[in-house]
Image: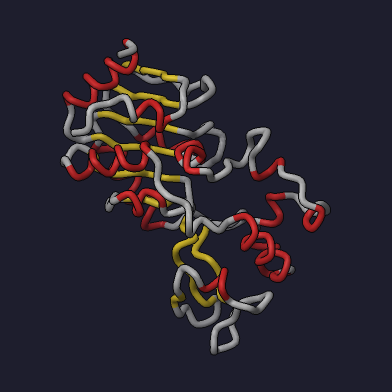
Amino acid sequence: MDQTIATLQQWIDRVENIVFFGGAGVSTESGVPDFRSKDGLYNQKDVQFERYTPEYLLSHTCLVREPAVFFAFYRQKMDARRVQPNAAHRYLAALEAAGKLAGVITQNIDGLHQKAGSRRVYEIHGTTARNYCMACGKPFAADYLFTSPDPVPRCACGGVVRCDVTLYEEALPEAAVQGALAAMRRADLLIIGGTSLTVYPAASFISYFTGSRRVVINRDPLALPPFGGQTLQINAPIGQVFGQLTRP
């Protein structure tokens, strides 16, 4: 076993209160594209949407001003219903089942942590697994936006049915944020995985960690904010790294 992996195993074995903070790189091994890499969502060329920026297509403004465009893009790019969890999701679920993982804080909206069995998941950017009417608040099934034949899906009341995803220009969900920060403050070990730490305010969450050890697992090296404790940085796909660890 590589020494860095052995050190990670030792750190995990010695603590009982771990928090995981993850981003798009956690799901790429399941076939979900990230956003900013050369093959990511923001760099995919599509004639249908070429006059728009990806940020606009995933914005509150687009949803309100051009809902047909918003839903066409959403249906084409955001459908994770058939995607399955990978080794990273399954390992984190096993850690939680063993009583060692206090929570998963995720920037992802694909619901793969829950599919793998995790229960304490703080979805700070929302999820594609929930939908609701913008007028009356009625909830709709996860499939609704993808199965509705209407270019703009609507409720019986006439309101537009939208995804419970935090779009550009919208605030993060308060309950998820408060739960995530509380878990971060209580953690003994922080594992950061599959994120470039460039999306704010989410990236600022790691500053609330007050423990003595943190681990960063990412394909590319990251410039990390100052930290008074020990940092272990592993540059490799996170599923590959977790696949080398002993299941709790």
Quadrant position of residue 61: bottom right
The quadrant the C terminus occupies is top left
The quadrant the N terminus occupies is top left
**Residue 173 shows in the view:** yes
91 displayed left or right of 216: left
Report the residue that reaches farthest toward the bottom: 157
Q: Residue at x 36, y 24 (%)?
A: 215
Tell me where residue 19 appears, x and y as whole percent: 30, 37
68 displayed left or right of 206: right
Tell me where residue 218 appears, x and y as whole percent: 47, 26
Q: Nearer the viewer, residue 71 or 138?
A: 71
124 above or below 190?
Answer: below
**Residue 229 shows in the view:** no
Q: Nearer the viewer, residue 134 or 114?
A: 114
**Coloration mode:** secondary structure
Quadrant position of residue 86: top left
Tell me where residue 20 appears, x and y as whole percent: 34, 37
Q: Nearer the viewer, residue 45 or 195?
A: 45
Q: Nearer the viewer, residue 232 or 173?
A: 232
115 above or below 234?
Answer: below
237 above or below 128?
Answer: above
Tell me where residue 117 appears, x and y as whole percent: 28, 51
Q: Residue at x 36, y 48 (%)?
A: 113
177 above or below 241?
Answer: below
Q: Residue at x 71, y 70 (%)?
A: 68
Q: Residue at x 36, y 42 (%)?
A: 89
Report the residue that reaches farthest toward the top: 3
Total numbered circles: 0
